[in-house]
Amino acid sequence: MRFAELGHTDDFFGRLVVTELVTNSYKHVGVGQIIVRIFRDACEPLTVIEVQDEGAALPVVRDEDHGATSGRGLLLMAQLVHDWGVRPLDGEGKVTWARCAR
């Protein structure tokens, strides 16, 4: 997979981040294309994961709820990555991105 090409000896966290961001896009947008890009950060030794969708709603990290059966994905992801955020696109859609150590 792409993570090995970028120098990751273990791609578990990268695959986990991709899965969470794509699942979040699909669950909350549900229509249109979801585009995934994985590439090397130009300035730091990090790998960038971008997930683009056509939704306008921004992802929200929920407070920890021990009784909930879902809703912990972004909270977990935020603790595993270097940083992450959302970039609105002109027109419709957004790119949710995360930067992971290699």
Image: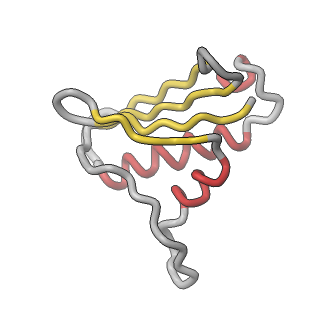
Question: What residue is drawn where x is 59% and y is 52%?
Answer: 77
Question: What residue is drawn where x is 29% and y is 35%?
Answer: 88
Number of numbered discs = 0
Q: Residue furthest right?
A: 9
Question: What residue is drawn where x is 62% and y is 17%?
Answer: 43
Q: Is residue 70 above or below residue 16?
A: below
Residue 51 found in image quarter: top left
Q: Residue furthest bottom?
A: 67
Residue 75 found in image quarter: bottom right
Q: Is residue 85 left or right of residue 54?
A: right
Where the N terminus falls, by quadrant?
A: top right
Q: Nearer the viewer, residue 37 or 100?
A: 100
Where the C terminus falls, by quadrant?
A: top right
Q: Is residue 35 left or right of residue 81?
A: left
* Display colour scheme: secondary structure
Q: Is residue 40 left or right of residue 58?
A: right
Q: Position of residue 48 (x, y in %)?
A: 57, 28
Question: What residue is drawn where x is 39% and y is 40%?
Answer: 86
Q: Residue furthest left?
A: 91
Q: Is residue 11 above or below residue 57?
A: above
Q: Position of residue 54 (x, y in %)?
A: 26, 37
Q: Position of residue 82 (x, y in %)?
A: 64, 40
Q: Is residue 41 left or right of residue 35?
A: right
Q: Nearer the viewer, residue 68 or 43?
A: 43
Q: Position of residue 42 (x, y in %)?
A: 59, 15
